[in-house]
Image (cartoon, grey):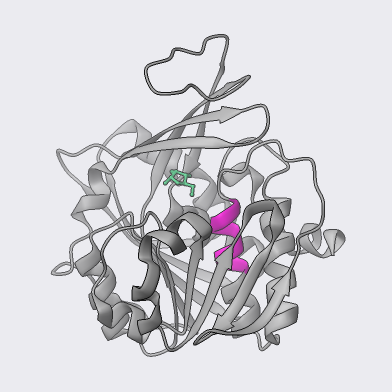
Amino acid sequence: MSSVVVIGSINLDIVATAERLPVAGETVTDAELGRFPGGKGANQALAARRLGADVIMVGCVGNDADAEDALALLREGGVDLANVVVVNDVATGVALIAVARSGDNQIVVAPGANRSLTAESLVVPQADALICQLEVPTETVAKAATNFSGFFCANLAPAKHVDVSVLQRADLIVVNETEAAWYGESLRACTGMLATTFGAAGAVLSRQGEDLARVRPPRVEAVDTTAAGDTFTAALTVALVEGQGPEDALRFACAAGAAATLKPGAQPSLPTRDEVLALL
Ligand code: RIB
């Protein structure tokens, strides 16, 4: 069994599911409201756990009622929460998510306690793999990258400036097509693998401009695409660390991402390994 450390965000997702997404300045009504545990870091931690890894989560929550709701499925799923710090006088991170019947979404995040995961306070446990994203301070991600000695995956989401040392240290960088366009030429600093996702059109795994694999995901009827990218990131990392080759690992990750779109909510939708294998 592989071991994974995830350093990143923990949120409570407040989700309104409506017929369609509003355009700027518009009100869309008749939505259904839901509350789900989320946050890119926490989603990736639980996704890796459900795919069979031993997982340590490093993050921060507030000293409030939302914290327990945000941590509930991580706890139930057996993710090690000994490195999750409760911070006084700040709120647990909240994501406001609008989901359309098509499965597409829009997300606005109020990071709250996730901002308290500072580089100064960071302790980096060792494991086979480390996964970071960018919903916590980027200095923290840079320190984590430097202080970790195993396989390092940087999911550069949401897009923001990161120290070039993160790009140079990463064994695997994961971006979606929007993020890939935002980072542009700066991704050339990456000497490891680069995975670029294209939603239902699949993903490409490359190294220094050379394709290693291209995969289309299995066709599914998407209900909610929230956390599909997080699931893809966790699955690709787990598969590569297990020793799967680029083609098999990318196929596994695409199927895992597709499987995560079949149920509403971020963490309730994260698939088990058997559910992923059933789609392959
Ligand atoms: O990637 C999906 C996640 O992004 C949601 O769970 C939400 O919390 C935001 O962080």
Q: Position of residue 92 (x, y in %)?
A: 30, 40
Image position, residue 51 (x, y; %)? 67, 66
Q: Nearer the viewer, residue 214 or 38?
A: 214
12, above or below 245, in the image? above
Position of 238 relative to 88 (above/below): below
Q: Looking at the image, is 46 positioned above or below residue 186?
A: above
Percent of width and height locating residue 258: 72, 53
Residue placed at 62% from the left, 82% from the top? 240
Closest to the observer, 279 or 116: 279
Classify the position of the N terminus by image quarter: bottom right
The residue depicted at 35 percent of the width and 36 percent of the height is 94
247 or 233, which lies in front?
Answer: 247
The answer to whether one can see residue 1 in this image is: no
* Residue 233 is covered by the magenta coloring: yes
**What residue is shown at x 80% (from left), y 47% (from top)?**
220
Looking at the rendering, the stretch of residues picked out in magenta corresponds to 228-235
The quadrant of the picture occupied by the C terminus is bottom right
| Residue 84 located within the stretch drawn in magenta | no
Within the image, what quadrant is residue 52 found in?
A: bottom right
Where is residue 73 drawn, in percent x and y? 54, 47
Report the side of 89 relative to 114 (left or right).
left
Residue 93 visible in image: yes
Q: Does 64 appear above or below 28?
A: below
Q: Is residue 101 left or right of residue 156?
A: right
The dominant secondary structure in magenta is helix
